[in-house]
Amino acid sequence: DAGVIQSPRHEVTEMGQEVTLRCKPISGHNSLFWYRQTMMRGLELLIYFNNNVPIDDSGMPEDRFSAKMPNASFSTLKIQPSEPRDSAVYFCASRGDRVEYFGPGTRLLVL
Amino acid sequence: AQSVTQLGSHVSVSEGALVLLRCNYSSSVPPYLFWYVQYPNQGLQLLLKYTSAATLVKGINGFEAEFKKSETSFHLTKPSAHMSDAAEYFCAVSEKGGSEKLVFGKGTKLTVNP
């Protein structure tokens, strides 16, 4: 298996632009997680899905952030409009056998 | 509510020395416990997990951790540090039968000196 796949790996955008991050979980995993990592705040859980249904989005910072999982093999995290303080590494993880497997992350820089 | 405390945000050891990274947890029910490692510019990778089998858990790269219920601890050790062990290490907890979320500690950055 290729593991969790995230795209793009790097994204540089200007404030106010829409950003869409993509994730393909490991096949057969029923749970998917989106995290954000910064030096200041560490690793934060933004939202997670079970069987494509959002279960807990209490970590989503504000209405500018939205996440979808239209099917078992694809999820998106969208930021609209983006702000400089959204600059971070965004990780997607999927769960199998109680273990979360992380993707390589998307490094986002909002100018 | 679950929580994880990692004592020491930075730990420095010499190559060949013992590595000890501390983790204490809080959980109202029997926990599942995990150690993850993050190398620079990479995602988190599972080192080992405790799921109520043996209390001494062996992981990859020579690491092991011991679950001590009386001390609510799950410290990570390695007898002899290697330069390639330099990374950030995260302890995490989830509750059996409870929320499926992992709660992560703030991480410990390990430096290995030659």
Image: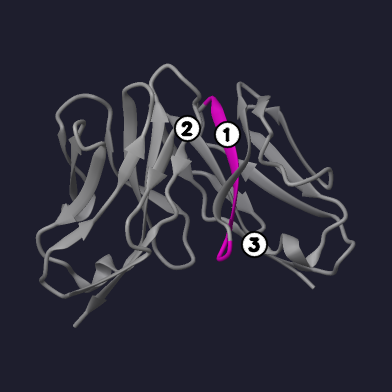
Quadrant assignment, res B16: bottom left
The magenta segment: A30-40
Q: Position of residue A8 (x, y in %)?
A: 67, 58
The type of residue carrying mark 1 is Leu
Quadrant assignment, res A109: bottom right
Q: What is the chain identity of the residue bearing mark 2?
A: A
Horizontal placement of A4 versus A36: left or right?
left
Dot 1: few (<14), some (14–19), or many (≥20) neighbours within 10 Å? many
Vertical position of residue B97 compared to residue B39: above or below: above
Q: What is the chain identity of the residue bearing mark 3?
A: A
Q: Which residue in the protein does label 3 denote? A: A88
Does the rendering let one see residue A98? no
Q: Is residue A34 magenta?
A: yes
Vertical position of residue B101 compared to residue B48: above or below: above
Horizontal placement of B30 versus A86: left or right?
left
Dot 2: few (<14), some (14–19), or many (≥20) neighbours within 10 Å? some
How many numbered dots are placed on residues in this image? Answer: 3
Direction bottom: furthest residue? B114
The type of residue carrying mark 2 is Arg
Looking at the picture, tell me which residue is in the foreground, A3 or B18. Answer: B18
Residue that appears at 21% across and 31% down:
B69
Label 3, label 2: how far apart the Cα atoms are: 22 Å
Q: Which residue in the protein does label 2 denote? A: A95
Q: Determine the secondary structure under disc 3.
A: strand
Task: Give the main secondary structure, helix, strand or loop, of the magenta stretch.
Answer: strand
* Marked residue nearer the N-terminal end (1 or 2): 1
* Marked residue nearer the N-terminal end (3 or 2): 3
Q: Position of residue B56 (x, y in %)?
A: 13, 37
Looking at the picture, tell me which residue is in the foreground, B68 or B79. Answer: B68
Label 1, label 3: how far apart the Cα atoms are: 19 Å
Q: Which residue in the protein does label 1 denote? A: A32
